[in-house]
Image (cartoon, rainbow, N blue to C red):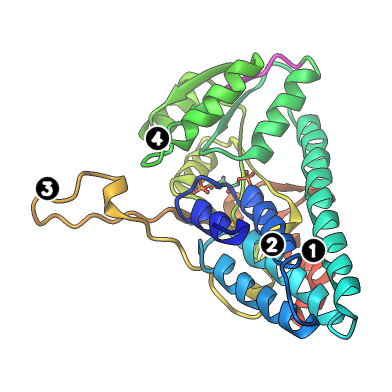
Amino acid sequence: MSTLEQTVADIKRMKIRGALDIAIASVAAMKEVAKEDAQDTDYLLNKLEKAGKKLKNSRPTAVSLPNAVNYILHVSEKNKNLEQSEFRKKITAAADKFIRDQEKALEAIGVIGANVIEKDETILTHCNSDTVVHILEKAFDQGKNIKAVCTESRPRYQGLLTAKELSEYGIQTTLIVDSAVHLVMKKLKIDKVIVGADTVCANGDLINKIGTSQIALCAHEQKIEFIAATESIKFSPQSLLGSTVQIEERSASEVIKPGKLGKVKILNPAFDITEAEYINMIITEYGIMPPQAAYNLLREKFGWELK
Ligand code: RUB
């Protein structure tokens, strides 16, 4: 199997998952496509476009995936008049820079996010976000003696990954079922909720793992700060043009054995939308911003996408 086919398959079956990892893996796959045998630059360009389509179709919700693919396609288009070997070099350099930039963004968010956390705070998180894990680990490294509460994140239980990672890092961690959030916020005196992002829209709405919006509502009711931590690659330029984000609907078999409940219909949406009004701040590699500033970030960062 080629790297491209392997990557598409791994994203589909969630071996590669989480919005940041999906973007990085997609760019790495396109870099490999650019190395394949080809008669000329046009042929390579065509291969990259086809690869981009396959990657974009592998999972629909995290906008970091089309953003990453479009960036490589943009560089390809800009350099299409170059001779083949020069063209390959440009794509390789762009892919390497993209991956480095994401690593730097993650690092920067870790530092900024850790500064937001105070000594002895208890932080609740949902699902499994590398970005959030990074923040909590940085805060722990600063000697802040934080505690973490992780939701299971049914039906795929990504919260167990978060709990394991944080606990192994030395952070005192508690795992709860998703429906315990409201009660536990009071019982364990949660200070902040920090979640990752799959997409941030121009109006500041956040799309993240199913259940995130309910947690935001609970946090709002209990006056607990609700924070999203996200690299700018997860902002959606298409939302500026009126597109809505497709919420991925996954197989019923992730919820229950098919047929076990007779004719009962099973609905399994993988993500939900948290409205901007329930978000206190968004942490990006550029710093802390209110969700309402999403528009400005989009215009500045993705101007080339919108031309
Ligand atoms: C993962 C999820 C994560 C975001 C951010 O969903 O919702 O919160 O992708 O993750 P899934 P990261 O498991 O369905 O991919 O910060 O690692 O990009």
What type is the residue that disc 3 sits on? Leu
Q: Position of residue 54 (x, y in %)?
A: 55, 69
Checking the image for residue 277, the label placed there is: none
Magenta stretch contains residue 146: yes
Q: Position of residue 5 (x, y in %)?
A: 55, 60
Marks 1/3: CA–CA distance: 47 Å
Marks 4/3: CA–CA distance: 22 Å
The residue where tag 1 is placed is 297
Beta carbon of the mark 3 residue lies under 8 A of ligand 1: no
Magenta stretch contains residue 277: no
The residue where tag 2 is placed is 235
Q: Within 10 Å of the Cα at label 3, are there few (<14), some (14-19), or many (20+) other Cα atoms? A: few
Any part of residue 166 in sight: yes
Marks 3/2: CA–CA distance: 39 Å
Marks 2/4: CA–CA distance: 26 Å
Instruction: Give, as a single range, the part of the protein colored magenta.
Output: 144-148
Of helix, strand and loop, which one carries label 4? helix
What type is the residue that disc 2 sits on? Phe
Q: Main secondary structure of the magenta part?
A: loop
What type is the residue that disc 4 sits on? Asp
Q: Is residue 156 above or below residue 272?
A: above
Any part of residue 200 in sight: no
Marks 2/1: CA–CA distance: 8 Å
| Front position in the image: 242 or 10 | 10
Q: Quadrant of the C terminus?
A: bottom right
Q: Is residue 101 left or right of residue 179?
A: right
What type is the residue that disc 1 sits on? Leu
The residue where tag 4 is placed is 178
| Front position in the image: 209 or 222 | 209
**Mark closer to the chain start, 2 or 4:** 4
Of helix, strand and loop, which one carries label 2? loop
Checking the image for residue 261, the label placed there is: 3
